[in-house]
Amino acid sequence: MKPASHPTALRTQQLLRERGLDASVVEFDQPTRTSAEAAAAIGCSVAEIAKSIVFRGKQSGQAILVVASGDNRVCERKVGALVGEKLGRADADFVRDATGYAIGGVAPLGHAQPLRLLLDGDLRRFVRIWAAAGTPFSVFPLTPDELLLLTGASWFDVRAE
C-alpha cells in the first residue's frame, strides 16, 4: 500500500477533500478490480469492500450505480423495482462513458454524467469500508455514514437471496 500517484486517484483524493472527507487514497502494485483482490490487498474481509456495480436502465438508458457489500450479489429485480424500470447490461464502454472510470475502479463520486445511485444497506454493519478510488489499483477507507454523505444516496436492500 502506498500513497496515490495516478492522476485519476489523485482527482478522487481532491474530490474527497472538497467534500470534507480526510480519507487517504492508496494504491497497490497488484490490481484490486474484484472484491476478493481488494480485500486480499487491504487485509480486510470481502464484505468490507464497497463494490460498484453499474446497470443500464432499459427505458431511460441512464446509468444506475449500486454500491454494494463485496460479499453480496446484487438482485437486478430489486434494483429495477427501486428505480422503476428494467435493467440492462452495462458494457465497459457504457461504464466508462457514464462514470468516467474503468470497470474495477468506479468510485462512488465524481461521475462523468448524472446517474442513479443506490447503497446496499448491508454496508452499515461495518465500522470501516473500502471503496474504489477511480482506478483498478486504488482504494480509500470511509465509514458507511461518510459514504451516505458523499453520495447523497439512500440505503436499500439490494442483496440477491
Image (spheres, grey):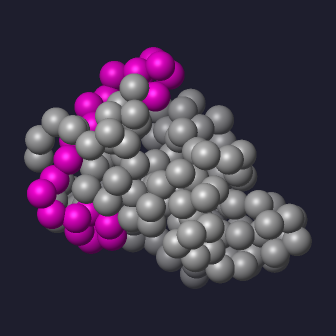
Residue at the image point whose x is 62% and y is 67% from the top: 94
- Residue 78's x, y, as percent? 72, 72
Residue at the image point whose x is 81% and y is 75% from the top: 58
Frontmost residue, 103 versus 37: 103
Residue at the image point whose x is 50% and y is 22% from the top: 19
- Residue 139's x, y, as percent? 30, 47
Q: How many marks?
A: 0
Indicate whether residue 24 is drawn in magenta: yes
Frontmost residue, 80 versus 34: 34
Frontmost residue, 12 versus 121: 12
Taking 44 as reference, is 135 left or right?
Answer: right
Quadrant for residue 40, please give it. bottom left
Quadrant for residue 89, please give it. bottom right
Taking 106 as reference, is 24 left or right?
Answer: left
Taking 61 as reference, is 68 left or right?
Answer: left
Quadrant for residue 120, please give it. bottom right
Q: Is residue 120 visible?
A: no
Q: Which residues are magenta?
A: 15-37
Q: In the rendered view, would you say 63 is above or below 10? A: below
- Residue 106's x, y, as percent? 46, 55
Secondary structure predominantly adopted by residues drawn in magenta: loop
Q: Is residue 147 visible?
A: yes
